[in-house]
Image (tube, rainbow, N blue to C red):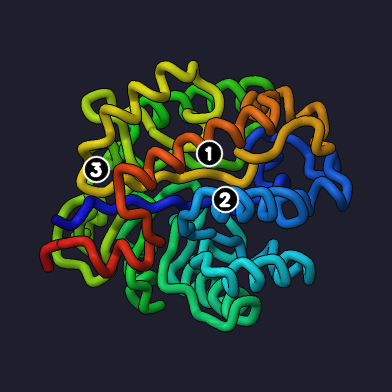
Amino acid sequence: MARRLASISVDLDSLPHYCRIQGLPESLLDARARGLVYTTAVPRLRALFAEVGVPATFFAIGEDVDADAGAARALGEAHAAGVEVASHSFSHDYALTRLPSPRMLEDLARADAVLEAATGARPVGFRAPGYTLNAALYAVCVQRGYRYGSSTFPAVPYYAAKAAVMGALALSGRPSRAVLDSPRVLLAPTEPYRPDPSQPYVRGDGPVVELPMTLVPGLRLPFIGTFVTTLPWAAVHAAYRACRGTPFFNLELHAVDVLDADDGIPAALVRQQRDLRVPVATKLERLRALFTWLRRDFDVVTLRDAASRLPIPP
């Protein structure tokens, strides 16, 4: 009997993107801090994947790779070692869905060109900045010929917390550059589906399959890296048990899930990102345990392979 599938993906958002979310000036970051994702986080992640024996997918931002030869080299080495490299757009513009379609298309095409130059393979998957999807962006994904998307994130607590944080930052005089998605996302399917091209948070017959991030059943809590590295371990274990019966376990991480304050991240950003206060040794220990559980209970594959193997009706 075939086992259920699981995938582990990592958004390689560099620290400038966190400054934009938190309404902080990017001038806080020196050159070393700007490059931490590729110089430090990516090697840690690759070592962890190799130790546990699981494949993974990296969602890379074209702009970050284009600006740094070291990042391009690290991404090429990851691809050569078996990590799938997918697109997280070129500019990681949180307002991507608000741009005219030709500009969306240009952004995604630039990202594909940069990532293909770094790895020798054109991306077949896409994750939207800020998980925000609409009909125009879905149409551009179809035009680019992606096999799958993994942007849908119908997590009620996450949506509410994001709205609250954005409101608080605006009141404090340093507005976030993040964008709050349409509330329609909260009613989106939680299992892999083919979107309606005109309403991508509704089931339909679109050619680009959508692989939502895993949520804890009933509560719709997001089972993502921040959850795993910051909450009480008993709660993480209980949530994993609740998710174990899901048809497809799509675990999403960020590169900062394997970084901490001792890596040279400015104190102002650490104060805003509480997950950076957790020692990296603790984070790695927890992720190692989780990856081991996934390997025991699922067939762990890249998102590219999941999109091909999952029985998603046309």
Q: Earlier in the sequence, mark 2 or mark 3?
A: 2
Question: Visible in this render: residue 156?
Answer: no
> What type is the residue that disc 1 sits on?
Arg
Location of the C terminus (image quadrant): bottom left
Question: Dots 1 and 2: beta carbons under 8 Å?
Answer: yes
What is the number of the mark on residue 288? 1
Disc number for residue 300? none
Q: CA distance from mark 2 to mark 3?
A: 30 Å
Q: Residue at x 51, y 71 (%)?
A: 108
Q: Which residue is mark 3?
A: 190
Coordinates of residue 47 in the picture (x, y in percent): 63, 52
Name the foreground residue: 198 vs 187. Answer: 187
Residue type at mark 3: give it: Thr
> Is 195 rendered above or below residue 172?
below
Local crowd size for mark 1, using a 10 Å CA cut-off: few (<14), some (14–19), many (≥20): some
Q: Is residue 24 left or right of residue 113?
A: right
Which mark is first along the chain, 3 or 1? 3
> Callout 1: helix, strand or loop?
helix
The residue wearing badge 2 is 51
Query: Which of the 4 image quarters holds residue 1?
Result: bottom left
Residue 137 to residue 118: above or below: above
Between tags 2 and 3, which lies in front? Answer: 2
